[in-house]
Each structure stands twice: as C-alpha cells, then as structure tokens.
Amino acid sequence: MEHFSTEEQQVEAIKSFWKQNGLAIVGGAVLGLGAMVGWRLYSDAELTSQESASEAYAQVMSDESLNIEKVGAFVEENESSYASLAALTAAKLAVDAEDFPEAIKQLSWVIEHAPSQEISDIASVRKARILFQQADYQAALTALNSIAPTSLQAQVNELKGDIYLALSDIEQAKAAYETAIEADENNRYLQMKLDNLSTKV
C-alpha cells in the first residue's frame, strides 16, 4: 500500500481517487439501491395481489348460491393460482349438473394454465375419467399419457386398466393394474380388479 507522509498528501490522494472513480461508485450505488427498492416494490405488489386473489377466492367459494357461472367468472377475471383451483371447482359443479362439455372445458383450462405440474396432472386425471365415462377411450388415454411419469401412478394406471378392459385388451389392462398395485400395494379393490381379469380370459 502506498505510504503518505502528511495529511495533505492523504487528502490529495483521496481527492484524486474520487475524481477518477467517484462517478462509477455513486452510479453503482444508485443502481444497486434502485434495484433493491424496485424488488421490494415488486414483492409488495405481488403479495398484495396474492392476498386480494385469496380473499376473492374465499368469498366466491363461501357463497351459498355457488354456481358454474360465478366460479367461471372468477376464473376469467383472475390469473393467480386460485384461478386453477376455482376452475377445478367449476368442473366439479359441471359434472354434478351433468354438463360434461363444460367440465372438460374447465379442466382443459387448468391443464394449460395450472401453476404447477401437480395441479395440471390432477386436472388431466379428472378429464380422462369424464372421457372414459363417455366411452371416448382414445381421448381418455391421450389425457392420461400427458401426465408426468411419477405423478398419481396408482390412479393413472387403474384408470388405464379400466379403459383397456373396456376395449377388451386384457393384457394391457393386466399390465396397467399391476403397475397401479406397485404404487398402492394396500389397495384391495385394485387387487380384486386384477384377480377378476382371470375370468375374462
């Protein structure tokens, strides 16, 4: 380090340093402070938005006259994760009303807009169940095949087994049920489905 013999030399050195580097230091500090303030404002805005969405969701779900139209309106007006939960509710209401096209529409929206793969996969399983009930077996299988390999394995493969059984593809049904049992060993109902296949051969 350079040694200064007098205070005057130290002062001159500091002045020279600031003359050469002061603008960069101040600029960096301003940019850093601006970024910090900007991030804080963004975080606060995100938190406020989530809180508002949460309150709106709770209000809609607690409505005693809850119906598809009200829930659907919430979905259209919100882009938060609560919109996906509301769309799942709308799909259930549609199924209860036997409005299966509306249920599939809501579930398809969730699959496309869900904030997580897990929620998307849940919607895919529910969509596949509706398609299976409508005997649209290939579409049901397509919906199930879009699900992540590690997600909902017991449910996915049990439904695949049901579909293959409906298609009279006993071997595929057996393989699907066996895979489902591997994921849910204590499910006696699954084991019963597998055992009943022997009577189909």
Image: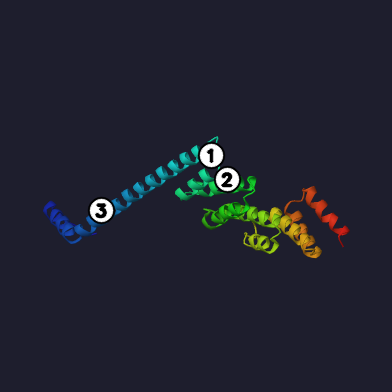
For the residue pair 92 and 125, the one nearer the viewer reads as 92
- According to the image, what is the colour scheme of the structure? rainbow
Q: Of the two numbered discs 3 and 1 on the same chain, state the one appearing first in sequence.
A: 3
Could you say where residue 55 lies in the image, as x and y percent from the top left? 46, 39
Farthest residue to the top: give it: 64
Whether residue 78 can be seen here? no
For the residue pair 142 and 156, the one nearer the viewer reads as 142
User: Which residue is painted at 55% across and 42% down in the image?
Assistant: 67
User: Which residue is painted at 70% across and 61% down in the image?
Assistant: 137
Q: CA distance from mark 3 to mark 1?
A: 46 Å
Q: Kindly state the secondary structure of the residue where label 3 is placed.
A: helix
User: Which residue is disc 3 drawn over?
Assistant: 30
Please state if 194 lies on the left or on the right of 39 as rendered. Answer: right
Tag 1: residue type? Met
User: Which residue is disc 1 drawn over?
Assistant: 61
User: Which residue is disc 2 drawn over?
Assistant: 89
Could you say where residue 45 lies in the image, as x and y percent from the top left? 37, 46
Please state if 188 lies on the left or on the right of 56 as rendered. Answer: right
Tag 2: residue type? Thr
Q: Give the quarter of the figure containing the N terminus.
A: bottom left
Could you say where residue 37 lies in the image, as x and y percent from the top left? 31, 48
The reply to whether dot 1 and dot 2 touch (C-beta < 8 Å) is yes
Q: CA distance from mark 1 to mark 2?
A: 9 Å
Could you say where residue 38 lies in the image, as x and y percent from the top left? 32, 50
Q: Of the two numbered discs 1 and 2 on the same chain, state the one appearing first in sequence.
A: 1
